[in-house]
Image (cartoon, grey):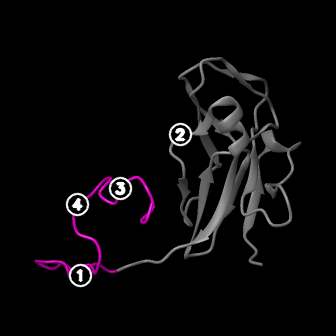
């Protein structure tokens, strides 16, 4: 298990640290560090503060993702999912929530609104060429070119 630094802001003094929902959960639940209820109208988006700043090690990123229950039951999603928290970002974690339903949704103080997944990434060095190597099974056909159904169906 890796240890990363986390700093709590005053407006999150009553919130617990981001924690996984279960022992084997990949995501750490992020709660709304709000002073009062916030109503998201249908089609509305809002920036929800989470009350913490983190310091990730080089080679790691934080991915902000929707909570499946909020998405399925209420149409509430992280708009730019997954949102990226870079290792050199030191500001407060905030979540862009959007209401894709046809009814208002109330975000309450302390409500778990998103999840944070910590992931490794690689840094690459680009080598510019005039022509790419051919891929063994794909070409540049693009979006939808592999079809809708599994092969053999």
- Total labels: the figure holds 4
Disc 4 versus disc 2: nearer the observer: 4
Q: Which residue is mark 2?
A: 79
Residue 141 badge: 4
**Callout 3: SS:** loop
As measured in the structure, the alpha-carbon distance from the residue carrying label 3 to the one carrying label 2 is 27 Å
> Foreground mark, 4 or 3?
3
CA distance for labels 4 and 1: 23 Å
Considering the whole magenta stretch, tell me its main secondary structure.
Answer: loop
Image coordinates for residue 103, horizontal then vertical, percent: 65, 17
Q: Nearer the N terminus, badge 3 or badge 2?
A: 2
Query: Which mark sits nearer the N-terminus, 3 or 1?
Result: 1
Q: Residue furthest left?
A: 130
Q: Are marks 4 and 2 in contact (CB under 8 Å)?
A: no
Residue shown at 66% from the left, 61% from the top: 117
Q: Are marks 4 and 3 in contact (CB under 8 Å)?
A: no
Above or below residue 21? Residue 123 is below
Q: Quadrant of the C terminus?
A: bottom left
Choose mark 3 or mark 1, whichever is in front: 3
Q: Residue at x 56, y 28 (%)?
A: 100
Callout 1 crowding tier (Cα within 10 Å): few <14, some 14–19, many ≥20? few
- Of residue 133 and residue 20, the one placed in the foreground of this image is 133
Reading the chain from its start, which is encountered first: label 4 or label 3? 4
Residue bearing mark 1: 127
**Residue denoted by label 3:** 147
Task: Locate residue 36, reporting x and y percent.
Answer: 79, 24
Answer with left or right where residue 15 lies relative to residue 56: right
Is 88 on the left-hand or right-hand side of 67? Answer: left
Q: CA distance from mark 4 to mark 3?
A: 11 Å
Whichever of labels 1 and 2 marks the residue nearer the N terminus, that label is 2
Q: Which residues are magenta?
A: 125-153
């Amino acid at each position: 298990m890796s240890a990363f630094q986390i700093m709590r802001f005053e407006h999150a003094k009553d919130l617990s640290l981001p924690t996984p929902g279960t022992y084997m959960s990949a995501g750490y639940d992020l709660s709304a560090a709000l002073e009062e209820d916030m109503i998201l109208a249908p089609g509305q988006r809002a920036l929800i503060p989470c009350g913490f700043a983190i310091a990730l090690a080089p080679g790691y990123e934080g991915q902000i993702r929707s909570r499946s229950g909020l998405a399925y039951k209420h149409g509430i999603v992280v708009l730019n999912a997954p949102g990226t928290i870079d290792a050199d970002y030191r500001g407060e974690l905030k979540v862009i929530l959007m209401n894709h339903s046809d009814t208002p949704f109330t975000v309450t103080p302390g409500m778990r609104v998103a999840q944070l997944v910590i992931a490794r990434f690689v840094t690459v060095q680009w080598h510019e060429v005039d022509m790419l190597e051919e891929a063994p099974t794909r070409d540049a056909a693009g979006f939808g070119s592999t079809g809708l159904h599994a092969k053999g169906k």
